[in-house]
Amino acid sequence: MRIPILWLAYSAVALSLQRVEVLVRDSTGVPIPGARVVVEPLHRTVVADAQGRAVVSSLPVGRYWLRVHAVGFMPAEVAFTLRRDTVLTVVLAQRVVPLLGVAVEAQHSELPEVGASPRLVLTPRELDRHRGQSLGEVLRELPGMGVITTGPGIAKPSLRGLTGERLLVLNDKLPLYSQAWGVEHAPELDPLMVESVEVVRGTAAVRYGTEALAGVVRLVPALPGSRPGIHGQVRLEGFSANRQGAVSARVDAVQGLWAGQVLLSARRAADAVTPQYGLANTAYEQYMGTALLQSLFGRTMLRGRFQLYRGRLGVFAGMHLGNLTDLERALQSPRPLVQRPGSYEIRPPYQDMWHLLSELELLQGALGEGQGSLILGWQQNRRREYDAHRFWSDSLQAVLGGRAAYDVTLTSWSLRAEVEQPIFGGRLHAVADARRQGSVSEGLERFVPNFRSYAFGGGLWQQWFWQQWQASVGFRGDLLELAVWRSVAGVWTRSQRHWVSAAVAALLGYVERPWELRASIASGWRAPTAVELFANGVHHGAAIFEVGDSTLAAERVWTAELSASYHTAPWHLEASAFAHYFPRFLAHLPTGQPVLTIRGAFPVFRYQGVPALLTGTELRSEGELLEWLRAELTATVLWGRELGQRQSLYGIPPPRLRLRMHAHLPSFGPFQLPYAELTMTAVGRGPRAPLDYAPPPAGYAVLDAALGAELPLGHSSIGISAEVRNLFNRAYRDYNSRLRYFADEPGRNLVVRLRWEW
């Protein structure tokens, strides 16, 4: 693997948006830890730390009000107008004293609310309660979010039924350029390394380009704080369903204008177990490390980061079968045809992945009355897939040794510049970006030909705020070139294609307390990937035979969204509706006819361009039933239609409803902020798509339960929690799992977490 000796990456933290630091006190001035602070009408929720301090960042100038409440205190509401960084001291049940000042530095969002649906945020505290074996399990907490899984450790995020190159996944501010290779490739990040998650629903192509047709998922890592000295954190996790253990350690050092950080994580899991049998060869292991160094020079900041991910993930052996008869039997059997005793051993078929990322961030926080940023990043992703039926003779095995069937290295360079200035009675944003990618295949098979691509784009959008009204309008243009090298009859040939197109978006919002109404329309486009154009062979990680179409044209979508929110002191209600119309949707569709190859029998999937309509509704509700009891409800309903054949669109997630009861209990003994949760998740039956290899599985409902608390230890603290997933050990199959054709999902899973901070 070639790794550049010199690496640079420039990015910036948006400083033009304002912050509010809320200090929650009782009448004697004692901090109130655990107080919940909600900024309306955005419904941004933050929980106060042990010092009674809560920081809400990335707020545009405007009028807001705070809702603050804590166990044992009367709730309070504070209205304020935000023009600059502000500190508010809230004294519960007695008085409110606003003080102007500058809030200390904190991690903050860079994602705009580009669509009608408000941005979704999973805070660090929420993540600590619900971290899973993969990032997909974390994202399932949010309305509209889903995952496509290929085993316990492989979960690819989807948003409103769209995934892959339509959903931009940001590792902090840098896109993860490793999601184009298929549905079974999960983001190369350990959940223990993620501090918070932010999701923008709706087409964000004006700001982020062709990869954000569905929206943006930002996985925010922990960054060094501003407190001088050396601080750290250790996390331990254990999972019973696959005997998994995970550990991570983080050390931050801050001295003057300099700060550094080192993060390390590791996890290892054995084969998973369903309520009735084991899942052979689903063991996996992954390791990750990050090193960061930053310095502040006045309003300019320089930050460098290097990140390494290594993973070996077993592919369920029951999906790799030797002949068509066995494949047909497996698709109809209630139990897998391949069963083995549980083990930590990872045998073929499996995936071996390396992902390297590096960046050096340059921040310029003062350009007149605005700010500017620059990001130059480098990433390299190497993916090797090993075939379960690779050798058909001992002599071939002796010659080929341990060579992978599929071995591809993708190297990406990216450059992004962004400027924001107050003008025309609002704020004008301008962005320009460029990307170069190259792929080299070195395996026994060439599933995708070698290629090199260049992308250039730029966008402008203007935001306005007038009393209760807000509006934005934006435009973007993009150019993409793709050169491909293929071997035809032993002769290498080169072909080249290019695409030029534009994206537009408009948003209108009205806020009249306690209501907020927003509507948006947008259009974006996406060029087909090399996989969609030229794939032709067995994709071992997904155990399918994929066929591309070199004649595919660019995909385009027109989107309309409408959302309404209702906010009061004890309750928050939010409902959204959207429609995506695709004159040409690049679909990944089953053909209904499996194929027999020298490597076994596999279902066949083909990339096709079809007209499609995707609509849906999302509901989110949160409220205080009692002073100590909170109810949370999220629901998502999607409907997809292939308009050409007037039939259901394959792969659209079924309806999902989640109801959680959260009891925040009084402290007892040495334990602070104790809580108890009971969660019910109900999922409906998926759509029956033509030519699917099996009917959609029945709907199901599962219960989860959790307990947790904080244990202060002087200048450090320990967080303890235990969670039982699938409490009653129910057997079920999930429509968006690749395992559903062959096996059930894992059964009851006891998860124990321990976090120590100092």
Image (spheres, rainbow, N blue to C red):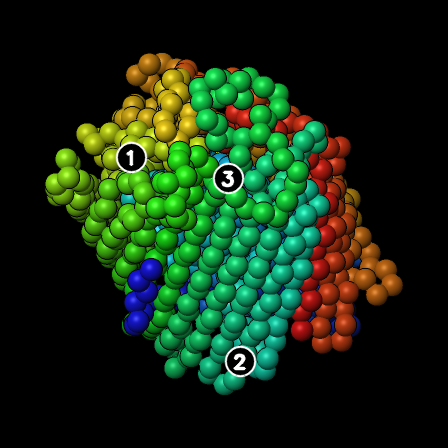
Secondary structure beneath dot 2 equals strand
Left or right of 721: which side holds 343? left
User: Which residue is located at x 63 percent, y 60 percent?
Assistant: 247
Between the residue at mark 1 and the residue at mark 3, the CA separation in whole angstroms equals 20 Å
Q: Position of residue 184 (x, y in %)?
A: 45, 39
Mark positioned earlier in the residue sequence (1 or 2): 2
Q: Nearer the viewer, mark 1 or mark 2?
A: 1
Q: How many marks?
A: 3
Secondary structure beneath dot 1 equals loop
Q: Position of residue 673 (x, y in %)?
A: 76, 58
Which is more toward the observer, 527 or 215? Answer: 527
Which is more toward the observer, 593 or 80? Answer: 593
Secondary structure beneath dot 3 equals loop
In the figure, 269 relative to 339: above or below?
A: below
Residue 393 in sight from this viewpoint: yes
Mark 1 surroundings: few (<14), some (14-19) or many (≥20) residues within 10 A: many
The residue that disc 1 covers is 535
Mark positioned earlier in the residue sequence (3 or 2): 2
Mark 3 surroundings: few (<14), some (14-19) or many (≥20) residues within 10 A: many
User: Which residue is located at x 38 percent, y 75 percent?
Assistant: 302
The residue that disc 2 covers is 254
Left or right of 314: which side holds 353? left
Between the residue at mark 1 and the residue at mark 2, the CA separation in whole angstroms equals 49 Å
Left or right of 531: which side holds 690? right
Q: Position of residue 627 (x, y in %)?
A: 78, 48
Q: Which mark is residue 315?
A: 3
Task: Pick out the residue farthest to the bottom.
Answer: 256
Q: Position of residue 475 (x, y in %)?
A: 24, 46
The answer to whether the residues at label 1 and label 2 have Cβ atoms under 8 Å apart is: no
Q: Amino acid type of disc 2?
A: Val
Q: Amino acid type of disc 3?
A: Val
User: Which residue is located at x 36 percent, y 69 percent?
Assistant: 361
